[in-house]
Image (cartoon, rainbow, N blue to C red):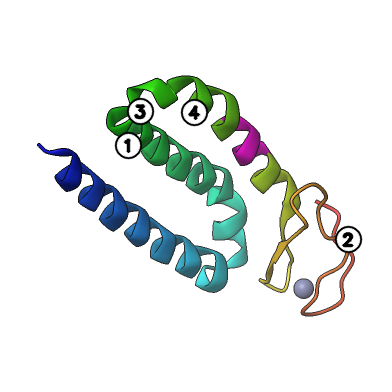
Amino acid sequence: MSEQETFAIFVAVMGTLAIAQYFFFERAPVNFKRQWRPWVIVGNAVVFSIFAVVMVPAALWMVVLFVPIICWLQFRSTRICSCGATLYGNGFSPPAFCQKCGAKLTN
Ligand SMILES: [Zn+2]
């Protein structure tokens, strides 16, 4: 498989995952989102990591170093309100209140 074919598959797979992730975070029921959020984040990271290392083997150290940090920041800064809204923090801290219903976010 050529590098161009691999890159085309990478773009198609990551685009599909991005669309699926959009529907997951915007449309899925609250309990489903809360239950599956860690697996969605880690699953996306694993797929990205595999493609990154296959396409650029020298990027292994960056994948090993940065992908877990990015996953942790994403998990830490995203909250799901009981009203169903998915709320994103600034990347380093989670939102304190729901922007949709105003509830205080605790988890
Ligand atoms: Zn809310």
What kind of element bears circle 3?
helix
Question: Which of the pair 33/17 is nearer the observer?
Answer: 17
- Residue type, numbered disc 1: Phe
Q: Could you tell me if the residues under marks 2 and 1 are in contact, i.e. CB atoms within 8 Å?
A: no
Q: Left or right: 39 with respect to 1?
A: right
Name the element at disc 2. Answer: loop
| Residue at left offset 15%, top offset 46% | 5
Query: In the figure, is residue 93 to the left or right of 14?
Result: right
Residue 102, disc: none
Which residue is under mark 4? 63
Q: Which residue is mark 2?
A: 96
Q: Position of residue 40 (x, y in %)?
A: 49, 48
Say what secondary structure mark 4 lies in: helix
Residue located 19% across and 39% down the image: 3
What residue would you read off at disc 1? Answer: 51
**Amino acid identity at mark 3:** Val
Residue at label 3?
53
The range drawn in magenta is 68-72
Q: Amino acid at mark 4?
A: Val
Tell me where residue 76 appears, x and y as whole percent.
73, 45
Q: CA distance from mark 2 to mark 1?
A: 35 Å
Q: Which is more toward the observer, 65 or 106? A: 65
What whole-number distance in Å separates the C-alpha atoms at marks 1 and 3? 6 Å
Specify the amino acid type for callout 2: Ala
- In the rendered image, residue 70 lying in the magenta stretch gets the answer yes
On whether residue 21 falls in the magenta region, the answer is no
Are dots 1 and 3 in contact, CB under 8 Å? yes
| Of marks 4 and 2, the one in the foreground | 4
